[in-house]
Image (cartoon, coloured by chain):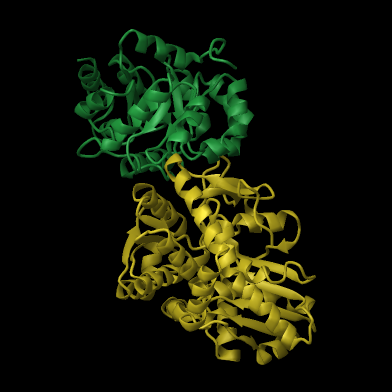
Amino acid sequence: MDATTQQFGVMETEFRAKRASGRKLLVPYITGGLTHWQQAIRAAADAGADAIEIGLPFSDPVMDGPVIQEASQKALDAGVNINTIFDEARDLDVGIPLAVMCYYNTVHHAGHRRFAHLLRSAGIVAAIIPDLPLEESGPWCESADSEGIETVMLAAPTAPDARLPRIAARARGFVYSVGLLGVTGERQSLAASATELARRLKAITDVPVLVGVGVSNAAQAREACGVADGVIQGASVVRRLMDHGPDAVGEYVAEVRRAIDA
Amino acid sequence: MEEPSATGRFGEFGGRFVPETLVPACEELEAAFRDAWADPSFRTELDDLLRDYAGRPSILTECHNLGATLGLRLLVKREDLNHTGSHKINNVLGQALLAKRMGKKRLVAETGAGQHGVASATAAALLGMSCKVYMGAVDVDRQALNVFRMKLLGAEVEAVQSGSRTLKDAVNEAMRDWVANVAESHYCLGSVMGPHPYPWMVREFHRVIGTEAFAQCHALLDGADPDVVVACVGGGSNAIGIFSGFVDTTARLIGVEPAGGAAVGRGIPGVVHGMRSYLMQDEYGQVQEAQSISAGLDYPGVGPEHSYLASIGRAEYPCVTDAEVIDAFQMMARSEGIIPALECAHALAWIVREAPTMQGQVVLMNLSGRGDKDVNQMMEILG
């Protein structure tokens, strides 16, 4: 498909329009099935989130640090599964795009076509699968494309220059620019690799570039947005939900919103 | 045994399902291994270490007493006699030499029973590298002796508290470490599992077991092959090592899994730890916890080449219960004066159970490790 005829998906269309209007994009991550997760999503949407990333809990989350591991385990212990999460996601109606972040075995086990269909039926428009790299993504992307699900690709600081355009070419919705070498979680400062990779990506693609992993507070989000089109906020959001409840999520998202709008 | 496909597949199993951060590292490792494996100087250096440091070749022992009891000829490949007490040293020396050649200064390893951790710590000490070993907290408790051995060897051991706190969680934590420290660290994976090129590379490093055993059997049996080749399977490294010598013969290949960790026997294809392979999982694809008396086999997955060998019917993967294993462990000690690792007692347990169907046959078993590490645990079980 050449660029002039390409039809962007729901999320990418919105993100491109918002970017064109000068707005930075803010995507909070919330572990699906965690106590009060739906309220947290509503609070985040009301506070100015541009999309929500719903984490599907998995037994072996190798890209996640302690906070999201704990959230994932809590949700699993409470008995949630993709059916319960999708049923509850369907009722959200928050007016911004919903994406899932899930490990590949969840997709593989359900079957590519079936999983893509389940997402669409639940009103979810995009998928982020951190252990499905470009070379293994073909069969899933084919099913996702045919169901209109946008597959967000991740780019890491370790990628050689020649790899980035290939990742960007396969990315739908946005490119997830991994902020550092490491797993999800909060850090004292934004790694230099975060802005460096975002800059490399911005130079080779017009797909929106969002920085995630290790963007830990409003100031770091603002710093990342100096280069990138937006940020994903994971552990900082999930920790607030677990420790203080959904209102704290809303307050935090509002704080980050103000910082990146300033 | 062949090389996997360009995408690291054995049939429909294998692959490279890793976070994007690790893709360049896997590519670099594959290229480095290909280059080293084709380099006679690397091969010579490794062979010298295997001979002069690890004590290869390991001997082949015929267990006459057990053979007479069971009505068959039982040949045992003595990987328990290698330095550090198991077959794990073959792979670790290979990977540590390769890591050094790649300019890495730090080894990261996971361990279940502690044998791979001890071997990794040993290689790191020998080659002047630092070593961090991740071990499930449950295993740290039941394998205290090996934990102390690793510390004596200068390694740092971290007890993993997440998930089921056993081998699979140790692999998760080692992968997280690798993601964070990929530039200076090599992930010294302990079995024929994980993302491409590990299943292939680790097999090549263990191929020496099968090559030696094949020649030793031929010498002993006047050029004949054994009828059956048996090994225990967790990830499957010792099994693939000995199978590699006999896959082109007519010998039956038997990989024995624990009843509580029967990935091939009770799993369906899934993707975890970088590979597509048989995997014990629930109806939503959550990985299930393995439950076995043996820390080294407490793994819900299996190396992809085993899944392939099972899928084409070349190898069989039966399972045995903890009770059968405890009996076999004692039987080998009393009949042969050999205390086997609990892992290898699984292989013997299957032989004991199936002996009536193998009367007069020659059965080759890989005795992949010695049982010293299990003595405390057995003392508690047997009172």
Q: Which color was chain B given?
A: yellow
Residue A174 visible to the viewer:
yes
Report the front residue among B217 and B104: B104
Residue at x-position 50% and y-position 78%: B48
Q: Left or right: B289 with respect to B106?
A: right
Q: Position of residue A64 (x, y in %)?
A: 37, 42
Report the front residue among B306 and A254: B306
Q: Is residue B364 above or below residue A15?
A: below
Q: Position of residue B144 (x, y in %)?
A: 36, 73
| The quadrant where residue B340 appears | bottom right
Q: Is residue A90 above or below residue B211?
A: above
Report the front residue among A40 and A191: A191
Q: Which chain has been coloured green in this picture?
A: A
| The quadrant where residue B192 appears | bottom right
Q: Left or right: A47 with respect to B139?
A: left
Q: Residue furthest top?
A: A21
